[in-house]
Amino acid sequence: MGCGWDAKSLRVTSDTFYRENVHREKNILVIHKYETKISVIQNRMHLIEDDRENGVLYWLL
């Protein structure tokens, strides 16, 4: 009340370095999630006996 600030202005920053850092951190988190999922698949590839399925997974990875 009367301080001149609203809730939205407190969340927005014009600092380009900060925004770039946040952007990169989000990308790193997404990449880490993909790496975790890929690792699970790679650890279980030896269980696949069909050559065609194994080849498809190899090329997907």
Image (cartoon, rainbow, N blue to C red):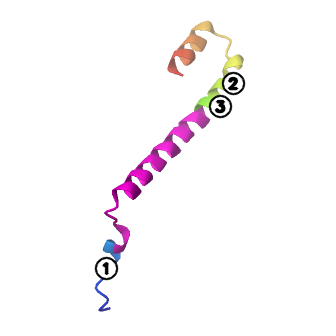
Image mark for residue 6: 1
- Which of discs 3 and 1 lies nearer the camera? The answer is 1
Q: Quadrant of residue 49?
A: top right
Q: Earlier in the sequence, mark 3 or mark 1?
A: 1
* Marks 2 & 3, CB-CB < 8 Å contact: yes
Image mark for residue 39: none
Q: Which residue is mark 3?
A: 40
For image coordinates 43% across by 54% down, the residue present is: 22
* Marks 2 & 1, CB-CB < 8 Å contact: no
Q: Is residue 44 magenta?
A: no
Q: Quadrant of residue 47?
A: top right
Label 3 Cα crowd, 10 Å radius (few <14 / some 14-19 / many 20+):
few
Q: CA distance from mark 3 to mark 1?
A: 46 Å
Label 2 Cα crowd, 10 Å radius (few <14 / some 14-19 / many 20+):
few
Badge 3 amino acid: Val
Residue 9, position as x, y percentages in the image: 31, 73
Q: Which residue is mark 2?
A: 44
For image coordinates 34% across by 65% down, the residue present is: 13
Badge 2 amino acid: Arg
Q: Earlier in the sequence, mark 2 or mark 1?
A: 1
Residue 48, position as x, y percentages in the image: 67, 16
